[in-house]
Structure formats: structure tokens, C-alpha cells
């Protein structure tokens, strides 16, 4: 197996950092053998001659995300299907989920709305953590909603998903929720120059980018709708202060900003004023 890993990394080292190339090599090995890394390191006796290996390597050399190559990723203990219609779940979003899970409210059957649900990963993770919650996810993309529904079945989560645009007034007929959570588009167009090709060339731009002249577009709309008693967002660290002001100006209180594992402000929460 050592030689197999070296064979892959030797073809990726000129394009990826050494540690990332090795991680990709182990990911490939696990996918193709159906064995964990520990099993592969200690006692794997199966074949390592895979006809499609070189195709996988070439796709990685084109910077296609390995999650799209294999069609899924493990995240928050879930097996999440991903396609080019959905963002790939990231560790920062797991931190968002973690903050929502800790909400303390009276009653058990809380109503939760995930806006811009994409693959459905946030909604499904919350439902798995709190089976008693009533969770719904909405997204403007019909393709994303189909993926989210598949993921709910795949992970045994009773979550409702609907295709919905938050900008028309009809969204207000949804009523109110105990918790609204969202990881909306928040990367400005001007930041494209700093992004890696695996994101820029493959992940859905509509789920990533906002206009340079209105970086808080989606946050403002969601806050103004006032659909939830508690509001949780994943945010662009550049606009943390602006986000705090936005929530205050839309009559949210108890505002807290939380740093991610890199020490950058990444999650903000607030409670609707009475």
C-alpha cells in the first residue's frame, strides 16, 4: 500500500501541497478498496490494480474536487451526496451546526428553517442531532433540492425540502420558526482572484458569490423577513462588524459572533426582540 500511495502522490505533488496530495491519495485508496485508512495500513491483502485510477488522477490534476469525483463526502458523521449543483460541506459549516444544536428554548419540538440548504447537510445534521425538531430546508435551485432529498433518505432523516426563492414577498407566508439558520452566498466577486481553481471552476457560483456593491444582500433579506426567534448565519469574516450592525438594525438582540478554528469570525447569532 505504501507504493500505491507514493504512486498517486508523485503525480499530484507538482500541483498540490505535499500533505494535501497524500490525503487525496489515501482518500482514493479508501474509496477504491472500501477499507479505512487503518485497515489499509495494517493488513490489507486485496488488489491495488484499479483500471480507473489514472482517470481519477487526471481529474484531480484538473483540480476537480475529489468529493465530486466520487459523488459524496463524509461530514458531521453523515454521508452526504454532492454534485456540481451543490456546495461541498466544509468544517466551518459544521461549527455553524454546532452552535445551533446548543440552543436552549422551552419545548422540544422546535421548528427550524434552513435557508439556502444546498445539499441539505445543515438541515439533516440538525435533525439527526435533534430528532424531535421539525426541520425544513429551502433553496432556489431545483437540482439542489433533489440532492437534498436524496441525502435525507440516505441518512435516515425526516426533513422536508422545498424549492423557494426568498426574495418574492410570498416567502412571508411560511409563518415563523423557532430557529432560522443559513449559510448564504457571501464571497464578493472581487475575491475570485484569491480562490483556488477547485472551488472557482467547479462549485456552483450562485451559491458562493455576491455583488461587490452589496455583500450583505442575502443576510439583509433573511433578517428583514424576521422568520425566526433565533437567527444563525455563517459569515464572511471581513464583514463581521457590519453583520452585527445589520442584526441590531433589524431588531435582533443578544448578538454573538463566534470564531472558527482559524480564529476568524465565522458564525453570528441573534435573537428577535420582543
Image (tube, rainbow, N blue to C red):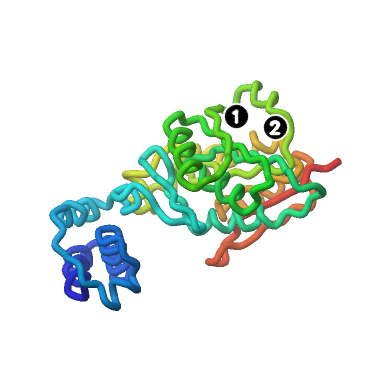
Marks 2 & 1, CB-CB < 8 Å contact: yes
Residue at the (26%, 65%) spot, across then down: 25
Q: Earlier in the sequence, mark 2 or mark 1?
A: 1
Mark 2 — residue? 225
Front in this rendered view, residue 82 or 133: 133
Secondary structure type for disc 2: helix
Answer with the quarter of the image where residue 29 lies: bottom left
Answer with the quarter of the image where residue 224 lies: top right
Q: Taking the image as drawn, is residue 208 in sight?
A: no
Q: Residue 55: x and y, percent?
A: 17, 51
Q: Residue furthest bottom?
A: 42
The Cα atoms of the two marked residues, 2 and 1, are separated by 9 Å
Circle 2 crowding by C-alpha within 10 Å: few under 14, some 14–19, many from 20: some
Mark 1 — residue? 166
- Mark sitting on residue 1: none
Q: Residue 175: x and y, percent?
A: 73, 29
Q: Residue 202: x and y, percent?
A: 33, 44
Rendered view: 134 above or below 6: above
For this view, does 262 lie left or right of residue 105?
A: left
> Where the N terminus falls, by quadrant?
bottom left
Residue at the (74%, 42%) spot, across then down: 178
Q: Residue 252: x and y, percent?
A: 77, 44
Q: Residue furthest right?
A: 274
Answer with the quarter of the image where residue 23 lies: bottom left
Circle 1 crowding by C-alpha within 10 Å: few under 14, some 14–19, many from 20: some
Rendered view: 17 above or below 252: below
Front in this rendered view, residue 194 or 8: 8
For this view, does 197 lie left or right of residue 246?
A: left
Secondary structure type for disc 1: loop
Amino acid at each position: 500500500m505504501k507504493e500505491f500511495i507514493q504512486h498517486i502522490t508523485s503525480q499530484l505533488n507538482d500541483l498540490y501541497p505535499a500533505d494535501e496530495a497524500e490525503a487525496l491519495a489515501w482518500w482514493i485508496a479508501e474509496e477504491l478498496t472500501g477499507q479505512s485508512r487503518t485497515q489499509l495500513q495494517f493488513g490489507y491483502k486485496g488488489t491495488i490494480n484499479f483500471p480507473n485510477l489514472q482517470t481519477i488522477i487526471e481529474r484531480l490534476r484538473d483540480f476537480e474536487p475529489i468529493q465530486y469525483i466520487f459523488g459524496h463526502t463524509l461530514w458531521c458523521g453523515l454521508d452526504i451526496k454532492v454534485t456540481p449543483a451543490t456546495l461541498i460541506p466544509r468544517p466551518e459549516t459544521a461549527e455553524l451546526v454546532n452552535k445551533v444544536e446548543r440552543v436552549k428554548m422551552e419545548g422540544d419540538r422546535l421548528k427550524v428553517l434552513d435557508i439556502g440548504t444546498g445539499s441539505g447537510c445543515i438541515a439533516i445534521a440538525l435533525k439527526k442531532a435533534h430528532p424531535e425538531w421539525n426541520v425544513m430546508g429551502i433553496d432556489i435551485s431545483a437540482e439542489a433540492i433533489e440532492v437534498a432529498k436524496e441525502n435525507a433518505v440516505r441518512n435516515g432523516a425526516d426533513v422536508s425540502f422545498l424549492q423557494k426563492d426568498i426574495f418574492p414577498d410570498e416567502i412571508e407566508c411560511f409563518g415563523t420558526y423557532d430557529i432560522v439558520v443559513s449559510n448564504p452566498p457571501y464571497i464578493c466577486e472581487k475575491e475570485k482572484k484569491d480562490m483556488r481553481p477547485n472551488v472557482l471552476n467547479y462549485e456552483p457560483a450562485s451559491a458562493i458569490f455576491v455583488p461587490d456593491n452589496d455583500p450583505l444582500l442575502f443576510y439583509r433579506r433573511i433578517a428583514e423577513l424576521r422568520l425566526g426567534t433565533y437567527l444563525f448565519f455563517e459569515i464572511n469574516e471581513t464583514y463581521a462588524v457590519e453583520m452585527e450592525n445589520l442584526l441590531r438594525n433589524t431588531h435582533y438582540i443578544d448578538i454573538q459572533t463566534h470564531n472558527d478554528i482559524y480564529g476568524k469570525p465565522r458564525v453570528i447569532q441573534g435573537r428577535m426582540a420582543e
